[in-house]
Amino acid sequence: MPSTRFLSRISKAASALVVGALLAATAVTGAHADDLADLEAKLSKARTNAKTTKSQLSSVMEDLEHSDAELAKAYEELEDTRAQIPVAKAELEKANGEYEVAQREADTIKGRLANAREERTSIATKITENEENTERARRGIAQMARDYAAGNFKVTSVEIMVGASDFSQVMADYNLSQTALRTEADAMRALREANAIATNMQVRLDATEEAISALQEQAAENVVTTKTAADAAKAAKDKLESLESTQTKAANQIEARKQAELDRQAELVAEQDSLTDDIQKLIGLTKAERDRIKKEREEAQRKERERLERERKQNGTTSGGGSSSGGGTSTGAKGRGFLGYPTANPHITSSYGLRYHPVLHYWRLHAGTDFRAYCGTPIYAAGKGTVEWAYMRAGFGNQVMINHGTVDGANLMTSYNHLSRFAVHSGQSVKKGDLVGYAGATGTVTACHLHFEVYVNGSTVDPMTRL
């Protein structure tokens, strides 16, 4: 039979294993750490993509500077929302994941706590049973002690021999004494084992109580964690629903203003053609010459549109074309350097060339160069010449047109558009660098800036080829 000390060591080891198992609930989070890490990586990627999209959006918005302001605003809101929705979805997925982990941990802790309480009840029952066994052993030993004191047992051989009347009596008394000794030994052993079991059971009970206390603390902490995760999931869901609502609203606004924008763009094209016609008449071109130049311009633009459309489909870009997009008859290097910059600190926000309309999905000519110019910024004459006019001209807003005369065998003019007010008048002579007006946002435009155009024989060319 194993020794009491050995049983004690086994009991303590078993107690440690039981308590360890009861407290293993905290391993739940670690088991799902990989899932949460994947969700975090997905969220990080979505945020990076949104940042890239937002950066690209600012470039696209420059192409809408000459569009309807409300349409441009709706488009910006739509695209910004589209960029945010994948982030919101990833945030919701991550929040739901964290909530599910917290819930699973709560369920595990609840189960561990129930097991611990069952273990406590079982140990308490065993302690009660062991106390009863201990009491019986003690009563047996006490009775034997009383029997010894009363002389009911002959223990020594001498006592047996002296007290016996014959040999059979000797044998009977001897067997009785041996039985008494075994009973005594068994009772003492039972008492020692009962005491050892009582000690070990108490150790296990104390450890279980400690485990229950720790699990209750974990449960209380988990309540807070679960509540926080649930709140985060709800906030993420509300955010996503709000973004989806905004997306729908912006898309509806764009759809409602599409026809108006088509009409507006048609008006801008007509205004540009009218301006070209006015200039060409002003410089004395015949109708045949005007028709020839127009045909050449339209053919050049057609080829450029086809080239850009191929690039757009291949690369998925919507950026505009280069200086060859104007289609004028003189877009080379002639006259380069004749003109100066129209602003003191030139910063180009949109170059000359064909632009892809992100809402209407067609190519149109951006017939000038846009310079950053805050409202009220002074605008200067790019070269010496005569002011042909300074008045409001539909989509161009307040426009100053300067005739620089013949340069390298062709007429050269410049216009300064969307001005807030004028500093010159028709017929006035100006020198390069003279103040002609102040930047504004008149006409078809979404913000203050300078739209600067250069004309060679009435056709627009890339201003950068002349500056």
Image (cartoon, rainbow, N blue to C red):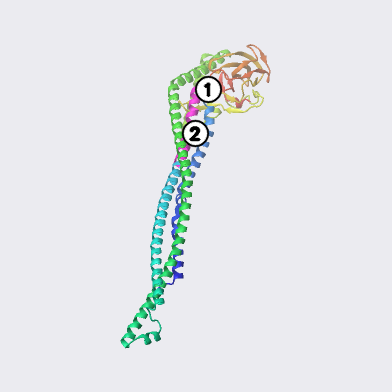
Residue 341 sits in which quadrant? Answer: top right
Q: Position of residue 400 (x, y in %)?
A: 61, 16
Q: Nearer the viewer, residue 385 or 295?
A: 385
Q: Residues within 10 Å of mark 1 (few under 14, many from 20)?
A: many
Q: Which residue is mark 2?
A: 317
Mark 1 or mark 2: whose residue is earlier in sequence: 1
Residue at coordinates 48% horizontally, 34% vertically from top-left? Answer: 84
Residue 387 located left or right of residue 178: right
Quarter of the picture containing the C terminus is: top right
Quarter of the picture containing the N terminus is: bottom left
Q: Position of residue 91 (x, y in %)?
A: 47, 39
Q: Residues within 10 Å of mark 2 (few under 14, many from 20)?
A: some
Residue at coordinates 49% horizontally, 33% vertically from top-left? Answer: 317
Residue at the far left: name it: 168
- Give the vertical position of 198 relative to 377 (above or below): below
Residue 71, magenta (yes or no) = yes
Residue 46 located left or right of residue 429: left
Q: Position of residue 453 (x, y in %)?
A: 58, 21
Residue at the far front: name it: 150
How far apart are the two marked residues, 1 and 2, measured between alpha carbons? 20 Å
Element on which disc 1 rests: loop
Please, what is the three-letter code of the amino acid marked with disc 1? His
Res 66 label: 1
Q: Depth-wise, is mark 1 or mark 2 nearer the camera?
A: 1
Please, what is the three-letter code of the amino acid marked with disc 2? Thr
- Give the vertical position of 51 relative to 167 (above or below): above
